[in-house]
Image (cartoon, helix red, strand yellow):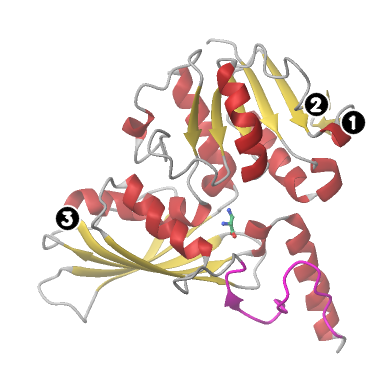
């Protein structure tokens, strides 16, 4: 097994708590999957540099992401610190020969950057090789969870149109949102006004349009990520995709309702996958078995983020 250096980048994970959750999730997935590495370093912004982070039986001293030579000797850099950090430091890591697996949206739509879900698009990795700096983008969590189920069906009968409705957990908005959901639930049950630090809406006992900014076309950014990433992922600029993304008051795991219309009639459905698929029904509103309603649900922090990123890194070792 080759030995590699892996960097887990985390901006301010001690300060915000939000990114900290992501770093622990990455470390856990790396550990559980017994990912082979010679050394593993944690990098963060200047103000977190020097702090210590204990995980299982090891302690890590956080290193400064901006220090000269920060990426020297790094083979694989897992970035999970937001678009601005990825844009600023990703190219520096690539210049040092690292393969950056980026969890942010910064490079997803760049035509030169592979957008990868290992189970369904290993070929998208193209010529990315260890030792030859490159960026690989992790799709958005809602896109990964949807396309895990929809891509085999697309390959089988070619999707012409996909209509997605999401039911997204607070964990997608970070640890602070999860904490606030607990707090709000308690407050509402006690008849108090709910604290609103993270979202302007009350989210205990409430559902609302995804918190991403609303764009000029009326869709929010999360919805448009699903549209654009699906087209890139399927390499099909004509596929019709529309999405409605909703936040629901649950802690973990996104659920999605997905309606698919196919070019060819269906003679079977694709079955088992890591993302749970249920409520499979022929769409009564379409003729000739060309439509399907399915309900998919997956852990967007595991398969939707950390697990997918580590799987991409594992592909580099093969
Ligand atoms: C969410 N898209 O809002 C995020 C997680 N990546 O759930």
Of helix, strand and loop, which mostly describes the magenta segment? loop
| Residue farthest along the bottom direction in this orientation | 191
Q: Quadrant of residue 120?
A: top left
To which residue does mark 3 refer? 157
Measured in 3D between alpha carbons, the distance from the residue under mark 1 to the one under mark 2, in whole angstroms, is: 10 Å
Measured in 3D between alpha carbons, the distance from the residue under mark 1 to the one under mark 3, in whole angstroms, is: 52 Å
Could you classify mark 2 by the number of other residues whose Cα lies within 10 Å: few (under 14), some (14-19), or many (20 or more)?
many
Camera-side mark, 2 or 3: 2
Tell me: residue 134, above or below residue 83.
above
Residue nearest the observer in this picture, 8 or 27: 8
To which residue does mark 1 refer? 51
Q: Is residue 88 magenta?
A: no
Q: Which residues are magenta?
A: 193-211
Rendered residue at 67%/59% (across/down): 173
Tell me: residue 81, above or below residue 188.
above
Tell me: residue 294, above or below residue 232.
below
Measured in 3D between alpha carbons, the distance from the residue under mark 2 to the one under mark 3, in whole angstroms, is: 49 Å
One can see residue 10 in this view:
yes
Rendered residue at 55%/43% (across/down): 106
Could you classify mark 1 by the number of other residues whose Cα lies within 10 Å: few (under 14), some (14-19), or many (20 or more)?
few
Which numbered disc flags the more N-terminal residue, 1 or 3?
1
50 to the left or right of 7:
right
Q: Do residues under tags 2 and 3 come within 8 Å of each other at their CB atoms?
A: no
Across and down, in percent, residue 287 comes to 12, 77
Across and down, in percent, residue 219 comes to 47, 70
Which numbered disc flags the more N-terminal residue, 1 or 2?
1
Q: Is residue 205 magenta?
A: yes
Residue nearest the observer in this picture, 311 or 280: 311
Q: Quadrant of the C terminus?
A: top left
- Disc marking residue 64: 2
């Amino acid at each position: 097994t080759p030995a590699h250096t892996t960097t887990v980048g985390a901006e301010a994970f001690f300060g915000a708590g939000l990114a900290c959750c992501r770093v622990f999730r990455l470390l856990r997935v790396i550990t559980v999957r017994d990912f082979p590495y010679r050394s593993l370093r944690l990098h963060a912004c200047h103000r977190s540099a020097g702090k210590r982070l204990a995980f299982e039986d090891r302690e890590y001293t956080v290193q400064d992401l901006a220090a000269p030579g920060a990426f020297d000797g790094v083979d694989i850099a897992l970035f999970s610190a937001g678009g601005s950090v990825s844009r600023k430091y990703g190219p520096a890591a690539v210049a040092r020969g690292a393969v950056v697996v980026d969890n942010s949206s910064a490079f997803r739509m760049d035509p030169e950057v592979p957008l990868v879900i290992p189970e369904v698009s290993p070929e998208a990795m193209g010529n990315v090789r260890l030792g030859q700096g490159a960026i690989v983008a992790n799709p958005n969590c809602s896109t990964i969870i949807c396309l895990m189920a929809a891509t085999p069906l697309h390959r089988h009968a070619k999707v012409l149109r996909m209509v997605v409705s999401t039911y997204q957990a607070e964990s997608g908005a970070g640890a602070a949102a999860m904490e606030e959901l607990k707090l709000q639930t308690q407050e509402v049950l006690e008849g108090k006004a709910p604290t609103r630090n993270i979202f302007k809406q009350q989210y205990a006992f409430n559902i609302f349009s995804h918190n991403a900014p609303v764009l000029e076309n009326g869709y929010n950014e999360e919805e448009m990520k699903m549209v654009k990433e699906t087209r890139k992922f399927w390499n099909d600029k004509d596929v019709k995709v529309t999405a409605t993304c909703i936040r629901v008051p649950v802690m973990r795991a996104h659920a999605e309702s997905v309606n698919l219309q196919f070019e060819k009639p269906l003679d079977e459905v694709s079955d088992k996958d890591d993302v749970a698929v249920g409520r499979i029904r022929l769409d009564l509103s379409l003729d000739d078995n060309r439509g399907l309603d399915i309900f998919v649900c997956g852990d967007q922090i595991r398969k939707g983020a950390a697990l997918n990123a580590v799987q991409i890194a594992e592909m580099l070792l093969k």
